[in-house]
Amino acid sequence: MKKNSLLKNILITLIMTIAATLAAFWFFRHVPENPANIALVYITALVLTARFTTGYVYGLLASLVGVICVNFLFTYPYFALNFTLTGYPITFLFMLIISLSISTMTSQIKRQGEILVEREKLLMEAEKEKMRANLLRSISHDLRTPLTGIIGNSSAYMDNCDILNEREKLDLVSHIHDDSNWLLNMVENLLSVTRINESSMKIATSLESVEEVAAEAIRRLLKRMPEAAIHVQVPEEYLLIPMDAMLIEQVIINLLENAIIHSKSTLPVELAVTDNGNHVTFQVTDYGIGIAPQRLKTIFDGSPYTPSSSSDVYKGMGIGLSICKTIITAHNGSISAYNREHGCVFTFTLPKENAKT
């Protein structure tokens, strides 16, 4: 790394010096009556060298070469060094001061830039640690509830098998089935996160059809929830955007499933996709009871939340929505939620082009 940096700095210094010399020759030939232009050319080269190299050495070297070139190439007698010229020490001192000043300023700017980059890295690491902690809390909370239900219902079935009627047995098995499906969905969510590069929070994307991704997500959801009623609205034009199709399908499934389960409404859930210039918006709307205002503030951070009125209403929302945010953030998109007069709206956006990194 140091060797590469050294070669880069030497190359920049050489290029700037050679370019300045060529430009000085042009001025010397075409504008000979104004020799100050030659000094300005070398001063410009000095400033650029100090700006784009590391440390003070290369700026000082550029100032030394500049003074020698002016003396040797453009001062009579030409092609001869003459250190007795009037004002020569002042010229050298002037360029030396410029070199030191520019090198000091650029070093400080670069150092401040490095500090900002390091600070951003630390903030990203802190954010990822917070997400991991919230995810672990959500996993422990959300796994415990269905597992406790499965254990309780299976124990009740085995202990009372002889005295239970068929309806009661069916109810217990139905509860076990529902909790098992919930666990399966949670595992799918956790597996989807493994597709995201943990160090960079980026994913491999390819151009995918918005309509096909939405259709596949609904097909997968209806396979698990055949009674669900979903109204879908997509753009008429064939829309392709960069995404990881499997991850976005998981986000759509999570949002639709949350709307169906937690809204407590008999009205259909709506999925609307709209083209908004440089991004595409996905909106899931339900006509249910909405979300508690205090829960809305932390709904995507993965923290478990169990209101005293009904623990089932919010069962599993933490981990699913936290993973949704992780996926959308990895796509350089945004996700939000808000209540309306009747129900709740979840919205996420995806850019039409990959962000430059």
Image (cartoon, helix red, strand yellow):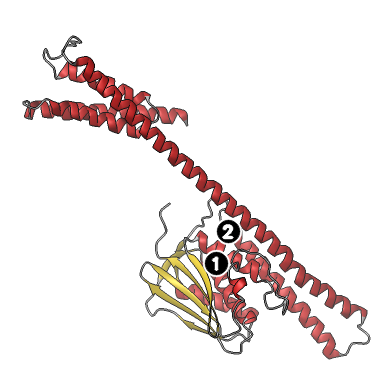
x and y, in percent, of residue 43 in the image: 23, 28
Identity of the amino acid at label 2?
Arg
Displayed quadrant of residue 92? top left
For residue 155, above or below residue 140: below
Task: Determine whether the residue tagged by mark 2 lies in a helix, strand or loop.
Answer: loop
Characterize the local packing of mark 1: few (<14), some (14-19) or many (20 or more) Cα atoms within 10 angstroms: few
For residue 106, above or below residue 120: above
Q: Which residue is mark 1?
A: 246
Q: Nearer the viewer, residue 332 or 166?
A: 332
Q: Which residue is mark 2?
A: 195
x and y, in percent, of residue 335 in the image: 51, 68
Earlier residue among tags 1 and 2: 2
**86 left or right, relative to 334:** left
- Which residue is rendered at x = 55% and y = 85% of the image? 342
The label shown at residue 311 is: none
Check whether the beta carbons of the residues at disc 1 and disc 2 lie within 8 A of each other: yes
